[in-house]
Amino acid sequence: MTDPTYTPPKVWTWDKASGGRFASINRPISGPTHEKELPVGKHPFQLYSLGTPNGVKVTIMFEELLDAGYKDAEYDAWLINIGEGDQFSSGFVDVNPNSKIPALMDHSTDPPTRLFESGSMLVYLAEKFDAFLPKDPRKRAEAMNWLFWQMGSAPFLGGGFGHFYAYAPEKYEYPINRYAMEVKRQLDVLDRHLKDNEFMAGDEYSIADMAIWPWYGAMSKGILYEAGEFLSVHEYTNLIRWTDQLAQRKGVQRGRMVNRTYGEPASQLRERHDASDFDTKTQDKLEAEKAGE
């Protein structure tokens, strides 16, 4: 479809009716829309999130830390429903003035430490527990290179390609082609790197892998935006190898379930407050329990 001609007005104004599927949560102003405090559970870390790729990065990190024996990494994960505007509550905005998930509070410090931006959380947790960040300066730099690559690249994948391909109210050729080209370039960057490296930082699994996998691992399997055939993701064999390898990790398997609200009910642990919740609180079990009342 050829884009219609659009002449930008002299002064842009906010049309609340535009924006497609996420029109109700996108706005050109910041700050809270309503007063509501965030819940606080029993663990040192309180995560307020949703099972999107950015949220999954952090839940994978927590589950990997716990799987590696770091008991002090226990956490509560509270569901933030962005479709209902939970991210605009006064409590959430106090933690993350940018009103984006995830948001994290570390209550093991006095006063508690707030964290927003998923990359910041990964670095903070890696340094706090001295885990999943290489100690060798060269390898550490490589991990940080790829972590920041992901933070800078994913908006082209999500807000760019994903929006115009899957969520925009109209399908226009130019933006879809423009962002499809960029996403394929990014997939090629990863595929070429992973041809000669087991993980993003070489031979060590790190927070760089945790950051990239939820976005580009899902894309390499054709899951994200259901665009696998459109982008010919089968071509990126090294990326697919890495994706499958990480998918076998227990921490990855559990982390991707937390705050998840879509897919098979057995894969959804909408809130996580204890390790036993994976066995007793998944959505399929909650629905069966409710049906038996």
Image (cartoon, rainbow, N blue to C red):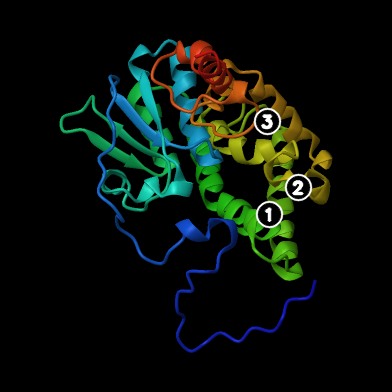
Seen as rendered, the residue at the extreme bottom is 10
Using the rendered image of the protein, determine whether residue 136 is visible from the camera's viewpoint.
Answer: no
- In percent of the image, x 61 and y 41: which residue is there? 215
**In this view, the mark in front (2 or 1):** 1
Q: Return the disc, 2 or 1, that comes first in the chain's sequence.
A: 1
Residue 184 marker? none
Residue 219 horizontal/vertical position (percent):
70, 41
Residue 261, by quadrant, is top right
Quadrant position of the N terminus in the picture: bottom right
Q: What element carries label 3?
A: loop
Query: Disc 2 to disc 1, how far (Cα)?
Result: 9 Å
- In percent of the image, x 62 and y 57: which residue is there? 163
- Residues 143 and 72: in front is 72
Identify the residue under disc 3.
197
Residue 45, by quadrant, is top left
Identify the residue under disc 2.
227
**In this view, the mark in front (2 or 3):** 2
Q: How many labels does the image show?
A: 3
- In percent of the image, x 64 and y 24: which residue is there? 246
Residue 96 horizontal/vertical position (percent):
32, 47
Q: Return the disc, 3 or 1, that comes first in the chain's sequence.
A: 1
Tell me whether circle 2 and circle 1 mark residues in contact (CB < 8 Å): yes
Identify the residue under disc 1.
166
